[in-house]
Amino acid sequence: MPEEPTQALRFGKARTARSAALLEDYVELIADLLAAHGEARAIDVAKRLGVTHPTAIKSIARLKREGLATARPYRGIFLTEAGRKLADRVRARHRLVVKLLLAVGVPAEAAEADAEGMEHHASEATLKAFARFLARAK
């Protein structure tokens, strides 16, 4: 068993990752909706994330407070430059994790579903190791 400070640090990182994962899921989905449909509405975000409309509104308000999104009445949700950059980083992490899972034999549907959670919790060191492994595997 690790020492208390080490274990506390690990659990703290996991809690932080869970909190960040919510924002990351929202910005990634909003970017996808904007790219596919030219707009991202709170009701569409709620449906695609499987949450209630009030829950989506609350999370979108957090995105706005954190400078990741803006919203205009009757115009939908838009990402700020910081929101777009975050969405791009999350999407790249997701693709990397999916590629790794596929490379080790995970079926495509399971790889996509599993990557949805793993992408938020893997450290930069782990992601770099994944990329090195995939580069060598080619």
Image (cartoon, rainbow, N blue to C red):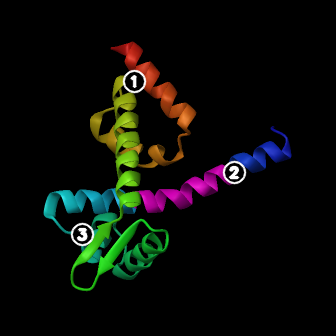
Q: Is there CB contact under 8 Å for labels 3 and 2?
A: no
Q: Is residue 133 above or below residue 127?
A: above
Kindly indicate the quadrant of the structure image that contains residue 35: bottom left
Residue drawn at the location 38% of the way across and 75% of the way down: 56
- Relative to the observer, which residue lies in front, 111 or 133? 133
Camera-near label (3 vs 1) is: 3
Reading the image, the residue beneath label 2 is 11
In the image, what residue type sits under mark 1? Val
- Relative to the observer, which residue lies in front, 109 or 47? 47
Could you tell me how far apart the alpha carbons at marks 1 and 2 are, in whole angstroms?
28 Å
In the image, what residue type sits under mark 2? Phe
Could you tell me how far apart the alpha carbons at marks 3 and 1 are, in whole angstroms?
35 Å
Marked residue nearer the N-terminal end (3 or 2):
2
| Secondary structure state at the residue bearing disc 1 | loop
Instruction: Residue lying at the far bottom in this picture: please name it.
Output: 73
Residue drawn at the location 35% of the way across and 38% of the way down: 111
Kindly indicate the quadrant of the structure image that contains residue 76: bottom left
- Relative to the observer, which residue lies in front, 11 or 84? 84
Reading the image, the residue beneath label 1 is 104
Q: Is residue 14 above or below residue 103?
A: below
In the rendered image, residue 20 lying in the magenta stretch gets the answer yes
Q: Quadrant of the C terminus?
A: top left
Q: Residues within 10 Å of mark 3 (few under 14, many from 20)?
A: many
Q: Is residue 130 above or below residue 2?
A: above
In the image, what residue type sits under mark 3? Ala
| Secondary structure state at the residue bearing disc 2 | helix
The dot on residue 40 is 3
> What x and y, as percent, mark residue 9?
74, 48
Secondary structure mostly seen in magenta is helix
- Boundaries of the magenta span: 11-25
Residue drawn at the location 38% of the way across and 34% of the way down: 96
